[in-house]
Image: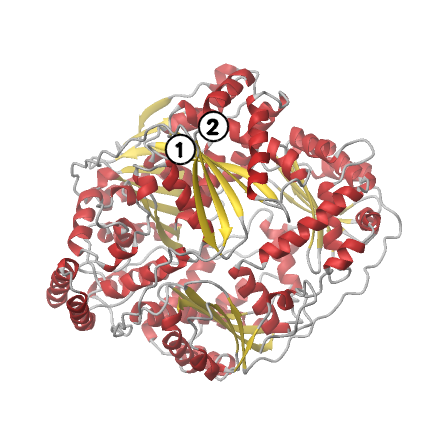
Amino acid sequence: MKPIKLMVMLCFLATLNIACKQNNTDDTNKTVKSEVKKDANGFSYEVVNNDPTGLRLYTLENGLQVYLSQNTDEPKIQTYIAVRAGSNYDPSNSTGLAHYLEHMLFKGTDEIGTLDWEKEKEYIKQISDLYEAHRAEKDEAKKLEIYKKIDEVSLEASNYSVANEYDKMVSGMGATGTNAHTWFEETVYKNKIPANELNKWLTLESDRFSKLVLRLFHTELEAVFEEFNRTQDDDGRKVYTAMLDGLFPQHPYGQQQTIGISDHLKNPSLVDINNYFNTYYVPNNMAMVLVGDIEFDKTIQEVNNTFGKLKKKDVVHPTLPTEEPITTPKVREVFGPTAENIAIGYRSNGIKSEDEKFVTLANMILSNGQAGLIDLDLNQKQLVQRAGSYTMFLNDYGLQQFYGSPKEGQSLDDVKDLIFAQIDKLKKGEFDEWLLEATINDLKLTQTKQYENSTALASAYFNAFIHHEKWSDKVQFLEELRKISKQELVDFANRFYQDNYVVVYKRKGEDSNVVKVENPGITPVNLNRDKSSKYLDHFQDIEAEALEPKFVDYKSAIKETALDKGVKVSFIENETNDLFNLNIIFDMGTDNDKKLGVAVGFLEYLGTDSLSAEDVKKEFYKLGINYYVSAGSDVTYIGLSGLRENLPKGLELLENVLGNAKSDPEAYASYVDKILKGRQNGKTQKRNILWNGLVNYGQYGENSRLRNVLKASELKAQDPQELVDIVKGLKDYKQRIFYYGKDLDHAVTALNKEHQLISPLKDYPEASTYVEKETGGNVYFVNYDMVQSEMVFLAKGKPFDAENLAAAGLFNAYFGSGLSSIVFQEIRESKSLAYSAFSNYDTANRKTESNYVKAYIGTQANKMEQAVEAMMTLMSDMPEAEEQFEAAKDAALKKISAQRITKASIFWSYENLKKLGIENDNREAMYNTIKSMQMSDLRDFFNKNIKGENYNVMVIGNKKDIDFKALSKLGEIKEMDVDYLFNYDTTTDVKM
């Protein structure tokens, strides 16, 4: 979970750090202060003037903080329930506890998920006592006997439980994104719900958080072990963990991983988990965040009527260790199969410190993705394969981490020295003065984009709560950055960047620290999917006001005009802000010319006859404009986005780059080296090998888009001027334009002036075609150093048929996707055979292509045979549960009812539909079809499209651990060479 959370933090720090960029000319309008008001019902709330988000922050009598903000783009509400409780507060002998508790909050209460609580609780007490005995016992043989008894009692207990009732209820409301995460200082529970279901959701959640029941414990523990195995296969997480260990040798940030350590996971204490819940899961240590289509006064009343009943309790978080200054560099090494890289980290003070402001600004000067020192001096000049930096701030401390990947033949120390050289430039003040103001404009642009998204905004709110931040300080934060002068930043950099860093070398090689986890041989527990608790029966009787679906009339929603030369311009007005997005679209891609992708990538490193490549990036950054040229298989885009007022200047600059790009043989040689090194690095990524290399081979065989690439010899022999000419010649082909923004006439005028075209425009070159192979009888295997094994089952289905879309969507919801799906329940909940398992009927993206049946399992190699057998049984004989079918059906209908296609998404959704030969909003037909569907219809769909299919099976795993005899039952095993899969170089043929 931490890598995901880390990525989220990077996004949100960009959001939070820009909360109040106002016009420079009127300081009085930028004054930020909080004010307490009362609503019509007497509830007090806090507001902040000049707050672009319109937050109302309430605090109930029991201490629960409630963050409310309105967003009426769709009739949905992004919900978060945040608890100031994370792995920092795990007992030192029970690491991983907070994360495990997070899992258990989905198991129900003494009312939710039970058929007979009085009987079930006796078994749960026995299980708890047995785990305490198991934990205390030192003799391994005796521990095993106790575990067998736990397994036996757990089976008996499952006679009185119902799996996944919570998910059934939230899914039945039409909720999406149901999940949770745990991190150092937080555990956060997530749902996005239809607005009309708010009161039902509040009722359910208030009951959920009022009582913890550790139901179906040992099967969920095994799922957590599988999650632990996934972390052992994640080299990026290993680097992150090693960095934290070096920066925080005393503090839990570095000494207690959220996932926990193996020994603690093997010896859990239900007593400790209950104590943790009772200590921290209290309203005055929690916040609720609701952002969406809400009425303030009505919503806070409903929250108070439900969560206001939770009892307040004093909470004292433990005092955590403080760190001594780092005075000499610390070195760590991490080993694994992925490509080598380096990370350099500096520890800072935490949130609300002066360090937060200065490090945030310094990081943007160094690495903003476009015009920072690292961006221009290292990435733009191709001195490294890739480099950058990011910041992370927590309650007690923060950090800035630099990362870099070497070019071919370059050492990690070479990359380290180049990064240090950029830090030295910052310390010497060797950067342009305008870059300070430009970074503020960049952050303003990020804020404008993200604050119109309810999920991003809600995330900013819960982060403020977790970190004890006043929202007024967040609104003011950007103005505080603007007060920092260049000299002050330089002075700070000289104090901050010294020999006080940690460096982590990620090297290729075997990881000697991997923990092998034994298969405990769990007896499958009873799911009782055909039964329900009294709570669920009552809950389903609660009626919510119906929400009517709204469908798009694409013909009227997308306006059209034309340029002087007749090029069609599609237009949707941006009614939210002054940002624009302009796309010139060519319905041709690498299928038409496989050099096209290489050509548009080369443009990134070229200047013009008047601007260097670095100057191009600087000029766009000054304007607050982003541009891109990208080539897909059948479509190419030239894009421009940013502040509408700068559209004409941005378009002029873009046309200058496209029309006057100057070939650079030296840059091209470095570009080829970068492509080839990128391919080598990609071959070390197991996800890339499985989902791109193996799956494409299973689908197409040798003749695929993936394999139709320029070989190394071809790239090196290529004349770079020809690639430049390809880019320059793009605008001579037939094209169309999509503009999302205000003032269409303003945009068309700029296009007519700057986007000069020939007449007539040229037709596209003929496209290559790729034939889908018949599937069945093949097992394609790649050997990879990993703890888990991962498998994909792929069966070619029938050609695309729009009539099947409704049934396919409902089948996926019922059978293969989500916490309450048949596959998840059987393979994870009942049998504990995998952390992740799913099955889908994937409908084609183009009307000329076939649909596919896909299934995935990620599990320990010693569970593979059992997991495969379980999956194949399900794919041959679909269990039928009428109640579960009706819940999936209701969920599908409610999701369509609450879905709104708005803004630029109207155009892009229409683009996707047209590829399928559909000219209208097909959700209306799907809605009407689903309404009348019965279980028998789903059975017919399964029998016609899933049952009896012939699968190609793609497997990646450690050859030493795989049971090939068992695997051979699925087909003829062919060990694949990775170079052969991607067709990068001439290699030996397929390994047999």
Judge left or right: residue 530 versus residue 367. Answer: left
Q: CA distance from mark 2 to mark 1?
A: 9 Å
Q: Which callout, 2 or 1, points at the residue further toward the start of the chain? A: 2
| Secondary structure category for the residue under label 1 | strand
Residue at 40% x, 47% y is 78
For the residues bearing labels 2 and 1, Cβ distance under 8 angstroms: yes
Mark 2 Cα shell of 10 Å, populated few (<14), some (14-19), many (≥20): many
Q: How is the image coloured?
A: secondary structure
Is residue 61 shown above or below 358?
below
Between residue 345 and residue 173, name the one nearer to us.
345
* Left or right of 371 on screen, residue 88: left
- Three-letter code, disc 2: Val
Say if residue 674 shows up in the picture: yes
Residue behind mark 2: 359
In what quadrant of the picture does the C terminus appear? bottom right
Residue at the far right: name it.
759
Q: Amino acid at mark 1?
A: Gly
Q: Determine the image quadrant of residue 748.
A: top right
Q: Residue 359: where, in percent of width, then height?
A: 47, 28
- The residue pinned by badge 1 equals 398
Q: Secondary structure at mark 2?
A: helix
Q: Residue 849 lies in what quarter of the image? A: bottom right
